[in-house]
Amino acid sequence: MIGMLTARELRLAGAKVRLVERGATGQEASWAGGGILSPLYPWRYPHPVTALARWSQQAYPGFSSTLANETGIDPEWTKNGLLILDSSEKAKAQAWAGSVGARLDLIEPNTISQYEPGLSAPSQEALWMPDVAQIRNPRLLNALKINLPAIGVAVEEYAEITGFVVRNDRVEGVETRRGRITAGSVVVAAGAWSGQLLAGLGYALDVVPVRGQMILFRARPGVVSRIVLSQGCYLVPRRDGRVLAGSTLEYVGFDKTTTEEALAKLSRAAIAMVPSLADYGIERHWAGLRPGSPCGVPYIGEHPRVQGLFVNAGHFRNGVVIGPASARLLADILLRRKPVLDPAPYALEDCANRDYYGTSFAP
Ligand SMILES: Cc1cc2nc3c(=O)[nH]c(=O)nc-3n(C[C@H](O)[C@H](O)[C@H](O)COP(=O)(O)OP(=O)(O)OC[C@H]3O[C@@H](n4cnc5c(N)ncnc54)[C@H](O)[C@@H]3O)c2cc1C
């Protein structure tokens, strides 16, 4: 998604753009994600993540309808709100909401069922964020797959990049399994694989794979209506009634296998939240590799040693929600336009010094 969105931004600004992808576009983490258009427990993230999220949240409704009109595929942007059943961090949450102007209400236990009738009887207050929306990320990716060639982006699939062509500290292109491609600028948006790809250039980008598993209930419309979050597990109801339940957070390297334990854990957590989900079958179980970065702040900017080589990677748990802002910011930096956000917190030079929250950061 990050590569596709960045290609789109650059192309719309008039650049000649080629998107080079190892497999088929729009798979991997961007397909595997839940499409929640907000960080979970957003007050736990440092300001650079919030800034990208807020910009993207404003842009999403228009972006989604433009894509739907131009491609015939509706990404199903839907504002159904986020109901957070844990209120132990309410003071922090309210302070955060006040400071960024987000709507966040405290709901008494006896009224929670008005928001989500199928919940098992909650015993404590909940937090309600009515403006949180979701997007059906596989549909968004399918729309982008149609949109990119239509606006003039050359898309080259099954062409793994194996290295960079660098002369006098300036990038001149990439080497792929299908040959060399020359380019005036190169953007690395290879998700969890970005660190690996850049390793040969003597600069360690701190991006690591973090596996997330997810299951899908074949439920009916109305079984779950809101995005519901409780103790790190969440439910995302799609318009057709299907309900996603996610997710795990596992540091197991580049391993995308699914496990029985995760299946059991996710289905137990989902059914504990909405007991009637037990009446519906689990249609699918999958895993994706998030591009983990320190505090979840992506790297958006130019390589410190190689001119013309840019990076847009490390979006961790929030690439879908922060992707549009991140793509726009990268395009601004590359094209030397006035940036939509202050680029400083995302710069690669800061790699070694990223400690926005010290040890207290818990995504
Ligand atoms: C279970 C799960 C739930 C999530 N839920 C949400 C959510 O609700 N909301 C949210 O905002 N985010 C969510 N995320 C996070 C989000 O999905 C990621 O942050 C985002 O998809 C990262 O996008 P990306 O384009 O950087 O990575 P990817 O989608 O992984 O794309 C990287 C691409 O680079 C290609 N590539 C790699 N190496 C090479 C190479 N050498 N040459 C050519 N191409 C290469 C890959 O094939 C791939 O297509 C979730 C993630 C997971 C796994």
Image (cartoon, helix red, strand yellow):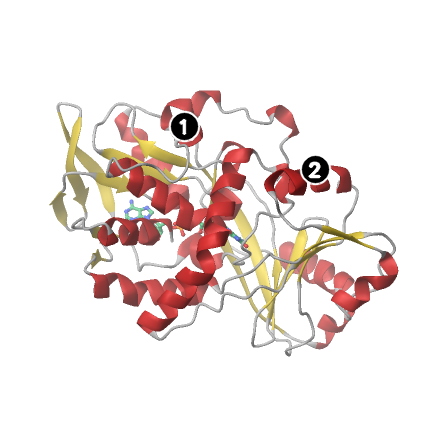
Q: Which residue is rendered at x = 30% and y = 36% of the image? A: 333
Task: Find residue 95 and name its label.
Answer: 2
Q: Which of marks 2 and 1 is nearer the N terminus?
A: 2
Residue 209 position, x and y percent, is: 47, 42
Q: With 182 as the anchor, is 48 left or right in this view? A: right
Q: Is residue 337 above or below residue 177?
A: above
Residue 362 in which image quadrant: top right
Residue 127 position, x and y percent, is: 74, 51
Q: What residue type is labelled 2?
A: Ala
Q: In this view, does 192 lie above or below 35?
A: above
Q: Which residue is rendered at x = 77% and y = 61% of the image? A: 272
Q: With 250 as the anchor, is 232 left or right in this view? A: right
Marks 2, 1: nearer the viewer: 2
Q: Which residue is rendered at x = 38% and y = 62% of the image? A: 141
Say which element carries label 2: helix
Task: Find residue 36 and name its label.
Answer: none
Image quarter where the C terminus lies is top right
Residue 292 position, x and y percent, is: 49, 39
Image quarter where the N terminus lies is bottom left
How far is disc 2 from disc 1 in space, using C-alphas? 25 Å
Q: In this view, does 24 lie above or below 356?
A: below
What residue is disc 1 on? 344
Q: Can residue 85 be seen in this view?
A: yes
